[in-house]
């Protein structure tokens, strides 16, 4: 944060000290809070910028990614929050950023950019993906299944492909568990987030709204 030095009359300083003591905050922190309340700015601090960016990453990438130290651009009045692979060991380099407006808090980074960053992190973490031909064939068979046009032979192929996906999911999740920094509490939620991230990485065209049960 930037710093500014101002001179105030002693009676005001005395009252501010009394209020700071009552609120159990430091005098500079109290003055800062008072000033920020007078301005209609949604994201004033690095902590606020980082919290908003991290919420976005959790929603779209589980625990694959984490944030670095936000940078404020006075010319555009925006925050840029570096995004890094959320690995346990080493010092990862940024693989992208989340940008947001300081005045409104609007996120300027779309979900496709988050997916691209997840893909980069997945590559670094050794996540294995099916090739484009596999994914295209899978989508084709699911579309036929959903429209009731799947033949018996195609149903067998689809079931085999689904089994391969499930096996790959388990392998990838194990890789992520070994390498990512996961919360010690609420592990079930963390693993569910890893599952979603793994599916998205293996099949970028995956649509959770589609019916994926194989018709018998």
Image (cartoon, rainbow, N blue to C red):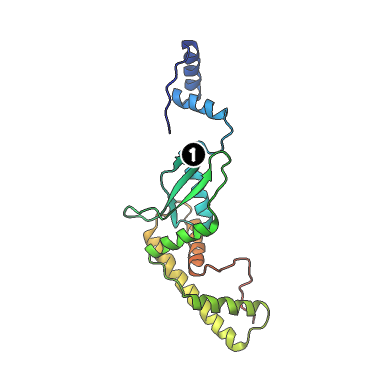
For residue 31, side relative to residue 144 (left or right): left
Secondary structure of residue under mark 1: loop
Q: How many marks?
A: 1
The C terminus, quarter of image: bottom right
Position above or below: 22 against 50: above
Q: Is residue 105 visible?
A: yes
Percent position of residue 160, x then y: 52, 81
Percent position of residue 17, x then y: 47, 18
Position above or below: 185 against 76: below
Q: Residues within 10 Å of mark 1 (few under 14, many from 20)?
A: few
| Residue closest to the far right | 147
For residue 80, side relative to residue 126 (left or right): right
| Residue plotted at (46% across, 60% down) | 118
The N terminus, quarter of image: top left
Judge by depth and name the residue closer to the eye, 14 or 106: 106
Judge by depth and name the residue closer to the eye, 178 or 101: 101
| Residue plotted at (61% across, 75% down) | 213
Asked which quadrant contains residue 139, the reply is bottom right
Percent position of residue 21, x then y: 47, 21
| Residue closest to the far left | 90
| Residue closest to the far front | 75
User: Which residue matches tag 1?
Assistant: 75
Position above or below: 171 against 53: below
Q: Is residue 163 visible?
A: no
| Residue plotted at (58% across, 88% down) | 153
| Residue closest to the far bottom | 153
Percent position of residue 47, x then y: 47, 40
Position above or below: 45 against 174: above
């Amino acid at each position: 944060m930037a710093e500014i030095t101002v001179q105030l009359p002693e009676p005001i300083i005395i009252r501010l000290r009394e209020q700071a003591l009552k609120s159990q905050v430091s005098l500079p922190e109290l003055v800062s809070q008072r000033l920020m309340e007078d301005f209609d700015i949604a994201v004033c601090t690095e902590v606020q910028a980082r919290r908003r960016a991290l919420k976005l990453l959790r929603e779209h990438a589980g625990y694959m990614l984490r944030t670095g130290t936000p940078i404020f651009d006075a010319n555009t009045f925006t925050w840029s929050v570096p995004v890094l692979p959320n690995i346990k060991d080493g010092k990862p380099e940024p693989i992208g950023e989340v940008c947001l407006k300081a005045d409104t808090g609007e996120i300027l980074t779309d979900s496709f950019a988050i997916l691209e960053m997840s893909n980069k992190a997945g590559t670094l973490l050794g996540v294995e993906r099916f090739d484009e031909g596999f994914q295209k064939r899978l989508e084709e068979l699911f579309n036929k299944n959903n429209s009731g046009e799947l033949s018996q032979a195609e149903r067998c192929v689809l079931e085999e492909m689904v089994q391969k996906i499930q096996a790959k999911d388990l392998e990838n999740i194990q890789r992520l568990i070994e390498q990512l920094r996961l919360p010690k509490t609420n592990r079930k939620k963390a693993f569910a987030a890893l599952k979603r991230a793994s599916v998205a990485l293996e099949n970028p065209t995956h649509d959770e709204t589609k019916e994926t049960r194989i018709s018998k």
